[in-house]
Amino acid sequence: MKYDICVIGAGPGGYVAAIRAAQLGKKVAVIERAKAGGICTSWGCIPSKTLLHAAGTLTALRHAGEFGITVGEIKIDTDKLRAKKDRVAERLVKGVEFLLKKNGVEWITGEAKLAGHNTIVVTGADGKSTMIDAGSIIIATGARPVELPNLKPNGETIITYFEALEIRGIPKDFVVVGGGAIGLEMAEVYAALGSKVTVVEMMPTLLPGFDIDLCKAAADGLKKSGVTSMTDTKVASAVQGKDKRWTLTLESTKGPAPTPLVADRVLVAVGLKPNSEDLGLKTAGVVCDTRGFITTDAQMRTNIPNIFAIGDVTGRKLLAHKASREGHVAAEAACGHAASIDYRAVPGAVFLHPEIATVGLSEEEARKTGVEISIGKFPLVALGRGVATGSMDGFAKIIAQKSTDQILGVHIVAPTAGDMIAEAALAIEMEATAEDLASTIHVHPTFSESLMESAADARGEAVHIWKG
């Protein structure tokens, strides 16, 4: 079989790349060993948001009395919740399949391995192999959870996010090892469902790498949700008792060892590693970094001109929407178009309650550049929509270069932060100034007004807060 472009992997990067290449008139095939939509659709982004929506609904019901609404006994049916999650995922899988088919992309099921610069061997479930010839190849094989040697997942009591999303019962004591986005989102879900949740993070803050104000907001929000957070702490050892419960011995980098934790279930969420080792990359001569992530340029091209790589397998920010944009870029570049990606403007979000979103430089990163900066910050407690809805925990923060007023970074904590951050990403991509954002009229009353107000504050022009 011969194709102009062959995409390995049908996740949020792969299927987008395949469809875009087909739109540009190429004969395209996509090779996938599982489902269309990849991890994001069936086992990650989408299912987790269904569960987080349920968690938010539970929280809203428990606080309904503040608005004069009386709610009776709240009951949780995890079987129905799991079924809802599965229906949502399946609907979106079918949607991706429909789009691939309508765009003329050929679907090939199996394991793919490079056998040269233009050759792929696909092995099906029956063990039979097929040779494919491709003018260009786009690798979009994603990543999988990192395992800890003393906490090997067993699918039941020590789990990864795959099993966590299945909600097989509600553990009494639930420990999350890892304070990144995945770990914190699952911590909030299980806390809302009734588990006693503890998060253990070896770094000094939750959400390592985020702006410090966002890290503090995450810790405060989780505390209000009943989650205990332990930073500067790691699991030294784990022993399972006859009752199948785990005793975790802890070490702290800032003092004596904390009291051991006992857990019915432990979620290990300490990061992801690339699915790159079984692709035949050495055979094809494709270069990876020391961690196995495939090295690419701004057009997602590897060191082999006709082989591209996108998404989590390339490292950088491991985000579905970044993978989708990289899919666009790789497809267009493979078709001879001048396409590239600007990583400055890649936003990220953590879907806690309230949501946390970020784009551009953190305050610490901005200060390290050596340029003088101005910071604007507007709290939701001073925002009409925040007060009206009782959503006053949060803020919008803007970092701008003082000499040029150009926006360098935006950080938001608000119920709709994940939606609001798109405006900030556009501002950074277009090299907009704080004045541009401050002078843009926003609908009142909305949470997005906090962006306008924080931009005004960065310029010393805010009228709805007092800093005397």
Image (cartoon, helix red, strand yellow):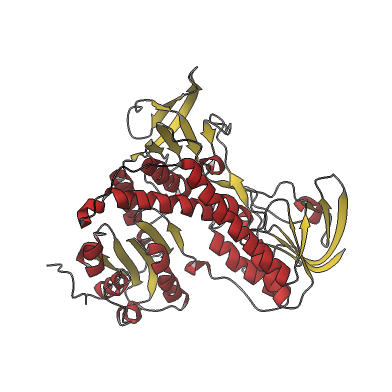
Q: Quadrant of the N terminus?
A: bottom right
Instruction: Using the rendered view, name the quadrant where residue 452 is placed.
Output: bottom left
Please tell me which residue is depicted at 72% across the width and 67% down the height of the picture. 101
Tally the marks: 0
Residue 383 lies, in percent from the top left, at: 23, 68
Please tell me which residue is depicted at 31% across the width and 82% down the height of the picture. 441
| Pick the front one: 291 or 185 | 185
Please tell me which residue is depicted at 37% across the width and 52% down the height of the picture. 56
Residue 71 lies, in percent from the top left, at: 27, 49
Furthest toward the top, the residue is: 242
Furthest toward the left, the residue is: 468
Residue 109 lies, in percent from the top left, at: 77, 54
Left or right: 312 in relation to 440: right
Residue 293 lies, in percent from the top left, at: 64, 52
Residue 269 appears in the figure: no
In the figure, 7 relative to 196: above or below? below
| Pick the front one: 385 or 410 | 385
Left or right: 284 in relation to 447: right
| Pick the front one: 101 or 279 | 101
In the figure, 243 relative to 432: above or below? above
Instruction: Using the rendered view, name the quadrant where residue 285 is placed.
Output: bottom right
Residue 425 appears in the figure: yes
In the figure, 156 relative to 62: above or below? above
In the figure, 163 relative to 100: above or below? above
Q: Quadrant of the C terminus?
A: bottom left
